Amino acid sequence: MKLLFLNYEFPPVGGGAAQASLATSKELAALGHRVDFLTISTEGSCADHDIDGVRVRPVRGYRRGLHDVSMTGALSFLSAAGRRLPQLAREQNYDLYHYYFGLPTGLLSFVPGPHRDRPYVVSLRGSDVPGYDQRLATYHRVMMPITRRIWHNAAHVVANSDGLRRLALASLPQQTIDVIRNGVDVPASPERPNRTQDPVRILIVSRLIDRKGINVLLQAFARLNGTEVSLDIAGDGPARQRLEDMARTCGVADRVRFHGFTARSALESLYRQSDIFVLTSLAESCSMALLEAMAAGLPVVATDVGGNPELVEHGANGLLVRPDDVDDLASAIGALLQDPARRRRFGATSRERAIHSHSWRSVAERYEALFEGATGISRPLDAGLDVGSVRPAAMPGRSAR
C-alpha cells in the first residue's frame, strides 16, 4: 500500500501522538509499505527527507516554541498542508490517508482534491474527543457537526484506549470505534543501578500544563518531608514558572529538579536512575511516558483516569489513585517508599507487560489489518520478512454500535 500519514505534531514537537505516529509509520515501512508523512517543519527546513524508510514531507508552520506547536501552530499547519495535500495526492496516488487527531488534522479530509476519492482512517488521541479537556468544551460544542462528519466518513475511527473510546461514544454513540493502544521501544535491559544508600528518586515525564496535575504532585511530595526522597520533573510547558514557584512555596525546591525539555538519551538515563514513576493526569488516553516507564522496569503510581487502568493494574505493577487527591497520592507514594521489595516486584511486572503487550510491530500490524480492510490491498507475503517480527496481539473487536 501507499500510505500518507498526516499529523501537525512530529518529534521533537508534541507529545505521545507525535511519537506514536512516527513509530507506527516506520514499522509499516519495515513491513513493506510505502509510507509518506505530511507534517509541520521541526528544524526550520521544509526539504523532504527520509527517516527509517518513511518519506517526511514537512510544510512551514508557526511554532510557539521549539517543542510546542500550540493551536495557532496547528491552524498554520492546516493552511500549509491544505495546499500541499492535493498536490501530493495527484503525484503519489496514495491508497489511504491516516489522520492523527480528528480535530484539527481531520479537517484536511474536506480539502478539495483526489485524496477525497480514497479511504481515510482517523486516530483519536485525547484532546480531539469532546469531554476530554474541559477547556475545549465550547470549541467541541461548536465543532460537533464537523466532528460527526469526519468520523462518519472515515473508513475506521481508532481510539488509543478503551477509556477514550467510551468517552468518544458518549458524544456519538452510533459511531464504530476500534481500539489500538500505543506501543513502546523496550530497552534490551533496564540496567537499573543499585542505589540502596541514595535517596529514592521519583520521576514524572509530562508537559507542564494544568491537565497533568503536577501541582497535586508537588503538594503530595511536600508531605514526604521526613523521607529521603527527590523528585525529577522532565518536560516543559506554560505552567513551568508557576510550578517552580509552588515548589518554593511548599518548601521542597531543594529536592525537586525541573529538567525542562529532555532529549531522548537523557530521558532514558532518567528512567534508569529513578525508583518510582508517577503520572498525576486529570485526563489521559494512553500515556507514552507511562509505557516508557513500564519498559524501563519502574513501579507506577498513576491516577485512575482514562486509559491508565488499562496499563496499570492496581497491586500488580503499580497503584492507582483518585485524580486531584493530594491525600491519596501522598499515601500511595509513601507506601512504595517504605517497601523496596514491592517496588522491585511491581517494576518487574511493568517491564514484562511492556514487552509482551506493547510492541510497535504489533501496533503497526493492527493498523495494517484495518488499512487492508479499507483498501482491499494486502501486503505481499514476502514483504517485511527481513525485519524481526513480534506476533501481533488479537485484533480488538469492532463495536456493534
Image: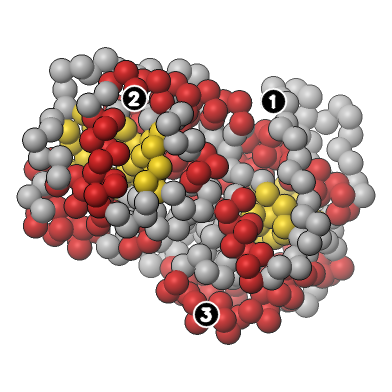
Q: What residue is disc 3 on?
A: 139
Check contact, mark 3 vs mark 1: CB within 8 A.
no
Q: What residue is disc 2 on?
A: 343
2 vs 1, front mark: 2
3 vs 1, front mark: 3
- Kind of element beneath mark 3: helix
Q: Amino acid at mark 1?
A: Val
Which of disc 1 and disc 2 is earlier in sequence? Answer: 2
2 vs 3, front mark: 2
Answer above or below: position of 273 versus 302.
above
Pick the quarter of the image with the C terminus: bottom right
What percent of the width, then of the height, locates residue 232? 24, 40
* Residue found at x 63% / y 67%: 170
Residue 247 in the figure: left or right of residue 377: left
Q: Quadrant of residue 196?
A: top left
Q: Quadrant of residue 125?
A: bottom right
What percent of the width, then of the height, locates residue 12? 45, 50
Which of disc 3 and disc 2 is earlier in sequence? Answer: 3
What percent of the width, then of the height, locates residue 265? 38, 33
- Kind of element beneath mark 1: loop
Check contact, mark 2 vs mark 3: CB within 8 A.
no
Answer above or below: position of 260 versus 89.
above
Q: Considering depth in this image, is 346 or 105 the residue closer to the camera?
A: 346
* Residue found at x 10% / y 40%: 225
For the question of whether residue 349 can be seen, the reply is: yes
* Residue found at x 21% / y 58%: 243
Q: Considering depth in this image, is 278 or 113 the residue closer to the camera?
A: 278
What count of labels does the image hold? 3
Question: Marks 2 and 1, Cα distance to the nearest angstrom?
Answer: 28 Å
Q: What residue is disc 1 on?
A: 390
